[in-house]
Image (spheres, rainbow, N blue to C red):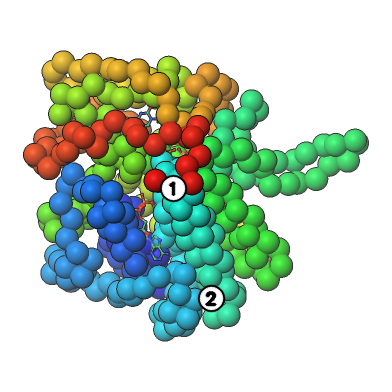
Amino acid sequence: MRILVLGGDGYLGWPTALHLSDRGHHVAVLDNFARRSYDDELGLQSLVPIESLHHRVQAWHEVSGRRLELFVGDLLDAEFLLDAVSRFRPAAIVHYAEQRSAPYSMIDRKHAVYTQHNNVIGTLNVMFAIAEVDCDIHLVKLGTMGEYGTPNIDIEEGWLTVEHNGRTDRMLYPKKPGSFYHLTKVHDSHNIEFGCRTWGLRATDLNQGVVYGQQTDQTGRDPRLATRFDYDAVFGTVLNRFVIQAVLGHPLTVYGSGGQTRGLIDIRDTIECIRLACENPAGAGEFRVFNQITETMSVADIAKTVAATFPGNVEVEYLDNPRVELDEHYYNVVHTGLIELGLQPHLLSDTLIDSLFAVAARHIDRADLSLMRPTINWRTPANRP
Ligand code: NAD
Ligand code: USQ
């Protein structure tokens, strides 16, 4: 298949492009390097050094003999995007290209507006490009489990049958997201469902949980193929952060009581879910939703697991929660759709955590401890930084 990966320079987009290419698909990557510019803006860097996208593409050709096509530009530039889709003519578009940090979206008004504009308008431009070039192009869109929040009922896969005053209907599952970033995914889901219902688009919305891990079969073949590994309080995700904190001898930063429970997924399963979704497309007019997680854990249990696996002393520190989120709640998520398509999950294991400790230890001199504590607070809306 011809597959266009939007956001192909990112933490997940790059390994996805390699996985799909390795499986024999003809892959193009598109990116505007916004993620690299957030590093420059906030003074961050990936713990594992990463090559420029041009060098990575060249390295993949040298290692595998396969070529990736490259489009450098912004989804907000509708003409550029339309041109890229018209020229590449993909059968599927995998859409990762959004600002994906909840704390970044909560810095102040400017960052909230940027995140909503970038994500929602970018996705609208993708929908219009598909509608103009060919409605049969399958849109595989990354959403988030955070769209649902933590409701006191079971979380279904995107849809809920509702009975009200003696009548029933199948409706999009109600959403209660926890940041301006998570809200963008809700807005995207509604826009895409409308496109399916109205224009006959075919779409898969993948409500993915928190991703952990750094290496895949393909990125491990050469250091030049490495993907990002973020540990700072803005872009680092919880399990990756705890692993790096343990190696640094820094206390694990549990927010609140740590009772908040989240869906998790190994990066190797992320890229396999994308392959499965692309190779088994949604029907014409179908808005298909999968909950892309393999297990659920509380933050305190993630900290305990990392501490128990580390071959040294680890402290756990309970910080005042900078976010507004429930830390005692019901959480039961249906996630059978991707398993039915053939996903064989890698569950969190000591071996995996050990290998992450090794990755972190190799590059630990690049860590900046001043970036470890959260500084962005949900409760104080700031008009400016
Ligand atoms: P990332 O920031 O590393 O990658 C996103 C890529 O998109 C970056 O390379 C960025 O430069 C690019 N991009 C952003 N806006 C763009 C635009 N307007 N035009 C072109 N390119 C643009 O993020 P990631 O961790 O790889 O996440 C990828 C997707 O998966 C995101 O949509 C995110 O919301 C979703 N997701 C991530 C996680 C996670 O734990 N990392 C979990 C659930 C869902
Ligand atoms: N947390 C801590 N300590 C930390 C970091 C986080 O206790 O040092 C807690 C947070 O308060 C939260 C949970 O861990 O309760 C997850 O936080 P996170 O930063 O790992 O994840 P989140 O902000 O939800 O965002 C990440 C990705 C985002 C994706 C989302 C999936 O950055 O792109 O959408 O995971 S989900 O959480 O399912 O919505």
Image quarter of the N terminus: bottom left
In the visual, does 69 lie left or right of 61? right
**Marks 2 and 1, how far apart at CA:** 34 Å
Q: Nearer the viewer, mark 2 or mark 1?
A: 1
Q: Is residue 175 visible?
A: yes
Which residue is found at the position 53% from the left and 37% from the top? Answer: 178
Residue visible at 31% across and 63% down in the picture: 33
Disc on the earlier residue, 2 or 1? 2
Q: Secondary structure at mark 2?
A: helix
Percent across and percent down for residue 280 are: 50, 59
The dot on residue 129 is 2
Q: Is residue 43 above or below residue 75?
A: above
Q: Quadrant of residue 243?
A: top left
Using the image, determine if residue 328 lies above or below residue 230.
above
The x, y position of residue 237, in whole percent, is 34, 38
In the rendered structure, which amino acid carries the disc numbered 1? Answer: Arg
- What residue sits right under mark 1 in the picture? 384
Q: Residues within 10 Å of mark 1 (few under 14, many from 20)?
A: few
Within 10 Å of the Cα at label 2, are there few (<14), some (14-19), or many (20+) other Cα atoms? many
**Hey, which residue is sitting farthest right in the picture?**
166
